[in-house]
Amino acid sequence: MKIQVGRNELLSALQAVVGVVERRQTLPVLANFLLEAREDELIVTGTDLELELVARAQVQNLSPGRVTVPARKLYDICRGLPEGAQITLEAAADRATLRSGKSRFSLATLNADEYPAMGAVTDGKLLTLKRSELKTLLEKTQFAMAQQDVRYYLNGLLFDANAERLRAVATDGHRLAFSEWAGNTGLSEPVQAILPRKSVLELSRLLESSDAEVQVLIGQGRVQVDIDVVRLTSKTIDGRFPDYERVIPDHGDKSVTADREILRRSLSRTAILSNEKYRGVRLQLVEGRLKLSTHNPDHEEAEEELEVGYSGPDLEIGFNVNYLMDALGAIPGAEVTLELKDSDSSGLLYQLGDPSSKYVIMPMRL
């Protein structure tokens, strides 16, 4: 294999794929990129066996072929070369040689036939929407995904789609994030898939906020997303996601409206002196006012009081302050509504007048 390519074109393809390559691998070949020179393009593949990313770059193909090269080393070399540099990459025997100007780098290679490429999804249910819309759905929900939970189906994000809408739902068992986009998806029948955490984060990174369309193909056990010259293919989590519609509480009889940014900043300040392990904050509601308070094992205390829209009986409830701030950070509007029932029931947080995205937070005993 031998190609000539501009540094910027090659780096762009490597950047799109490098996030999937783990530094520690069970198989040595998984620390490599698979490079395939075909006609006038170079196809770069990276995988961790659960997620595969494939990117294409326009090149001058002097000799077609396939080879695997150390991913991080090749990426770091290209990143370190001058802007606009020209690169010649040649592979022979067990070495790949990269030349640019007066620089030369020789990299060890592994047999390309040993590379476990997943391949494209050939059949499934196809849904279409704008990239900005899909990116917004992910950004509004992905923070609530669990991390390494024994309930493996929580370590990801649920896509729940039908002909008229797409929902994204994530929960770690203590909080739940729900967001819905309404529109023609192009689906003829409903479909659900749980996308693993790493795949969600990589997809969110690759998507840009544009009106260009993105196609999501949901197949048997796999999901494929095509974004220009990049293709993401992910295995799905085989499990039963919780019935999220039952988790989202009906309208509480106590409704609080507040300025989102003022509330977020107040929580941020009180969080400084919260218990570092439990991160609890106490909310005390009286008519027209909300008092926030935290304390820690060193007997340090913080209190904040702010004006809110509330008329009802006095109420005291505890929440994890990080969960509240995460939800407030995902809400774009200027004002938010917090619906409560009692001190033992979950709170429901959403943008004032727009319940298309909802955040459920379980209470804490303080």
Image: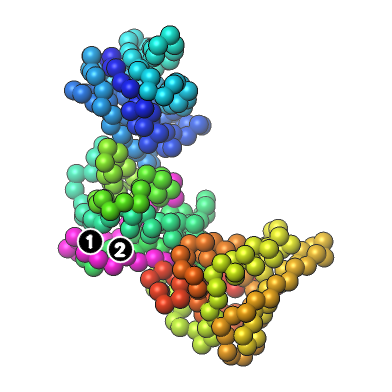
Q: Which residue is mark 2?
A: 166
Q: How many marks?
A: 2
Residue 28 image-quadrant placement: top left
Where does the C terminus fall, quadrant-wise?
A: bottom right
Q: Residue at x 19, y 44 (%)?
A: 122
Disc 1 element: loop
Verify whether residue 231 appears in magenta: no
Where does the N terminus fall, quadrant-wise?
A: top left
Q: Residue at x 31, y 43 (%)?
A: 233
360 relative to 339, above or below: above
| Numbered label attached to residue 141 | none
198 relative to 175, above or below: above
| Numbered label attached to residue 185 | 1
Left or right: residue 61 versus residue 282 is left
| N-terminal label among 2 and 1 | 2
**Amino acid type for the residue under numbered disc 2:** Leu
Left or right: residue 270 versus residue 59 is right
Q: Nearer the viewer, residue 333 or 109?
A: 333
Image spot of residue 220 (x, y percent)? 26, 51
Q: Residue at x 52, y 61 (%)?
A: 329
Disc 2 element: strand
Question: Which residue of the protein is positioned furthest toward the right in this rendering?
Answer: 299
Q: CA distance from mark 2 to mark 1?
A: 7 Å
Q: Specify start and end residues of the magenta stretch as a single range.
A: 178-199
Structural crowding at the residue carrying mark 2, measured as other residues with C-alpha within 10 Å and reported as few (<14), some (14–19) or many (≥20): many
Q: Disc 2 vs disc 1: Cβ atoms closer than 8 Å?
A: yes
**Amino acid type for the residue under numbered disc 1:** Thr
Image spot of residue 197 (x, y percent)? 44, 50
